Amino acid sequence: MKNNPIIWADYPDLDVIRVEDTYYMVSTTMHMMPGCVILRSYDLINWEVATHVYDILEDTPAQRLEGDQQIYSQGMWAASIRHHKGKFYVIFVANDTQKTYLYTSSDINGPWTKQYIEGFYHDCSLLFDDDDRVYLIYGNADIHLTELKEDLSGPKPDGLSRIIVREPGEYFLGYEGAHLYKINGKYYAFFIHITPATKGRRTQACYVADSLEGEFTGGEVFNDDMGYFNAGVAQGGIVDTPDDDWYAMLFQDHGAVGRIPVIVPLHFENDFPVFAKEAPTCIEIPSTRPGYEYKPLIGSDDFSYDTDENGRVKLKDFWQWNHIPNDDLWSVTDKPGTYRIQSGKISPNLTFAQNTLTQRAMGPACEAVVTLDGSELQDGDYAGLSFLIGTYGLIALTKEAGQYYLVMIARDTDDKSIFGNLVDTKPGDIYAKIPVKGNKVTLKASANFVNNTDECMFHYLDGESWRKLGITHHMVYKLDHFMGCRIGLFLFSTEKIGGTAEFSNFEYNVLN
């Protein structure tokens, strides 16, 4: 038996399929690169990274974090994954480019071929019908059905196009997060929904029709928060096992750690899905490959890498960059055992720093330790360890007039708005600043996410003892980043470019 939610980390907007004995799950990655992560499992409970669909989505100034441009809370959203006649299909929109992307591959590991679909289809879901006609459903409040051309390049002229579900009354969040299936000859459309009756709780809805031209009928099929702050479990895909058991892979808001996956059993009665009344707190599903050992979703790194035949380096798949990296300004091979990063722009704070290397924070609690060599920092540089979120906290080595200091900085969380401030160039408040001898330090960042505590703390190694620096900082999930917090290694310059930081011996531990 394993605890449910099954992954205590940020994997929102889920879609899941099974191909023979293997399950694949795709999730939103927004501004992170490489992006559009696909996880793999043989039991729907334990997961590992199978691939990222792209390294770079679009090489735009905003996706590169040039100047004050950025795509926080934008980028790729809510992908749909399908497998049809030996080929994988992943479709999603990007809110910064306002484009709809379709990636295809005959192998989950790629290479993936990118094309565009004419139009913009919010939270879309792809369906290949038995007659090889292809459809999308998408939208908010009004859910549209659109037939695509055979090459999937855009809407089919004179093809089927209609609204299949329309909001019947008052709502807080209209039907969205669409997922469309054909099961035993009937069509099933699943959505997320919030109405005044649920008092802000997200619920799952389903509508069913005998044909795509016919009437879709249905309503709420699942309403449960697992006793967790009225945070409803909803939005995601459904999938069957080889034994014909059915499960929904949904997610739940869990504060600053992000939106985390939850499994809910379901079955069909009179051709309508019946979800378990409550999401189980523990779950067990037979594995199609008993004894399989999964790669960790997070992990430590000694930064010992080799180049491939093309002279490139592929980092461990639990790392993602904050926006597109500047490959001229980082290396793990120039000095083996070290992640070496050089600044190439002036940045007012952490959120605009290029080449911040991140991993998802993991609940119930986690900590990261790293050694930092700042011998090549320049005055006004900040390098260190962070929890990257709109309301971030960090510990950094900095330099002023040739003197080294350790600082703890945190972004204010008093603003009650859930939207945050996307254009905030303030550096955050300095809660501690101490002079240090030498230019090499060992830093620790830790966080507690139990019951939305969402607190992070920072320490430095003083001899053989850890000493806390600054305050215990409360992080708040807001829509400015729209993503759970990330452990990040960073460098940014506030006075002149060219400074360098070297990170080594990165250790990541999940704490129970």
Image: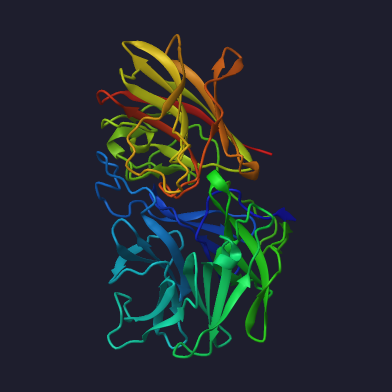
- Residue 509 drawn above or below residue 188: above
Residue that appears at 38% across and 40% down: 307
Image quadrant assignment for residue 403: top left
Q: How many marks?
A: 0
Residue that appears at 37% across and 24% down: 382
Q: Nearer the viewer, residue 510 or 429?
A: 429
- Residue 341 drawn above or below residue 439: below
Which x, y percent locates residue 101? 34, 65
Q: Looking at the rendering, in which quadrant would you find the N terminus?
A: bottom right
Q: Is residue 463 visible?
A: yes
- Residue 401 drawn above or below residue 97: above
Q: Looking at the rendering, in which quadrant would you find the C terminus?
A: top right
Image quadrant assignment for residue 240: bottom right
Which x, y percent locates residue 378? 30, 18
Q: Is residue 337 visible?
A: no
Which x, y percent locates residue 510? 62, 38
